[in-house]
Image (cartoon, rainbow, N blue to C red):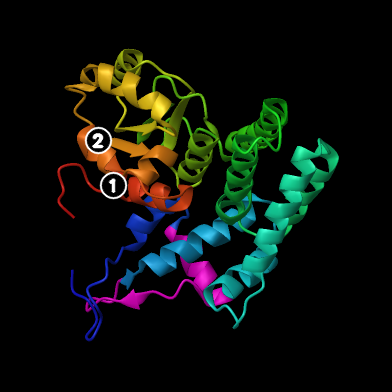
Amino acid sequence: MNLPAGRSQTAMFTASEVEAQTGVPATTLRQWERRYGFPRPERSANGYRLYSPHDVAAIQRMQAHLNAGVPASRAAELTQRDLDPVPDEPEARDAAEWSRQLTQALIGSDMDQAGAVLGQVHSQLPVEDVLTHVISPTLTDIGARWERGEITVAHEHQASAFLRARLSHLMDVAGVQEGFGPLVVAACAPGEEHELGLMMLTLALRRRGVRVAYLGANVPLGDLAVFTRQQDARAVLLALNGDWALGPTREHLRDLDGLGVPLFVGGALANARPELAEEFGGVYAGPDAPRAAQLIAAHLHRPQGGTS
């Protein structure tokens, strides 16, 4: 691929590759470029549009706003603001405050208020920012409060049930995209009951045009292997959040031998100990749902047998 003179060797994508990653047709990309001034592709020596990872991120943000029901013109404004943030952008502070409010509503068993907070957040931020900067910190905070004995397991279960329902709805809205794109099988490791992180990653993948068969919590590796083969999946995503899942996973890891597809390993335990992915013969997925989804989607949309 011939890059424009002076261009760095950052990975660049053609319009067809971007369409495969994001699900946004090349014709729509050109419309956005004319109407809104983004994405901002470079041109190859042959005149073809080449999109950077920054462009891909902008496209995904625009699509996230549209999927959330934001009108196109407003979605473009929000995306432009993301692309060209002003100094001391308040959204990070707002996200932290929204997370605090959501936590307080959940531990106070005020589900109406929790729903109102999330409604406000979704009107201001892309879905993946809501996952990364609001829901994830809330889950971490609630878990820490339970460990310190500040709340009961009943509080933690109620909060988890509320967020699980919200994530399940978002996953349904994103769809499973039957018959389109590569298939990933997503499961929590044996003994792992905490599935909200895996749900967030499933959502992020589906929004990138990846079909995900979501199996949920505590899946025996032998059954996972059988299902993966039957569905002719292109990859397996395995989540581990605590040491409680480590022993059962190691004990039955041989059940995954011979699958012939990549194994991506994620979750809180993998974040703390990324070397576990290599021990399992897999690849560390990444520290959060958007970055993990980007890594996995890029791998899946790479031509089979290709090296780049």
**In which quarter of the view is residue 93 placed?**
bottom right
Residue 243 appears at what percent x and percent y? 39, 30
Q: In the figure, 231 relative to 48: above or below? A: above
Task: Please give the residue where the numbered disc 1 appears in the rendered image.
Answer: 299
Residue 194 appears at what percent x and percent y? 52, 29
State the count of labels.
2
Say if mark 1 contacts mark 2, CB within 8 Å.
Answer: yes
Residue 80 appears at what percent x and percent y? 58, 74
Residue 37 appears at what percent x and percent y? 53, 77
Q: Quadrant of the N terminus?
A: bottom left
Query: Which residue is at a point 45% across and 49% down the rendered structure image?
Result: 288
Q: In the figure, 228 relative to 285: above or below? A: above
| Between 78 and 86, the one nearer to me in the picture | 86
Q: Earlier in the sequence, mark 1 or mark 2?
A: 2
Q: In the figure, 224 relative to 272: above or below? A: above
Callout 2 secondary element: loop
| Between 256 and 190, the one nearer to me in the picture | 190
| Mark 1 and mark 2: Cα distance apart in space | 9 Å
Label disc, if present, on residue 8 of the rendered structure: none
Counting other residues with Cα less than 10 Å from the Cα at mark 2, is it few (<14), some (14-19), or many (20 or more)? some
Magenta run includes residue 31: yes
Q: Using the rendered image of the protein, determine whether residue 188 is visible from the camera's viewpoint.
A: no
Query: Which residue is at a point 40% across and 54% down the rendered structure image?
Result: 19
Query: Which residue is at a point 58% across and 56% down the rendered structure image?
Result: 129
Q: Using the rendered image of the protein, determine whether residue 108 is visible from the camera's viewpoint.
A: yes
Query: Which residue is at a point 59% across and 36% down the rendered structure image?
Result: 147
Task: Please give the residue where the numbered disc 2 appears in the rendered image.
Answer: 262
**In this rendering, position of residue 239 left or right of residue 9:** right
Callout 1 secondary element: helix
**In this rendering, position of residue 243 left or right of residue 129:** left
Residue bounds of the magenta highlight: 26-48
| Between 229 and 291, the one nearer to me in the picture | 291
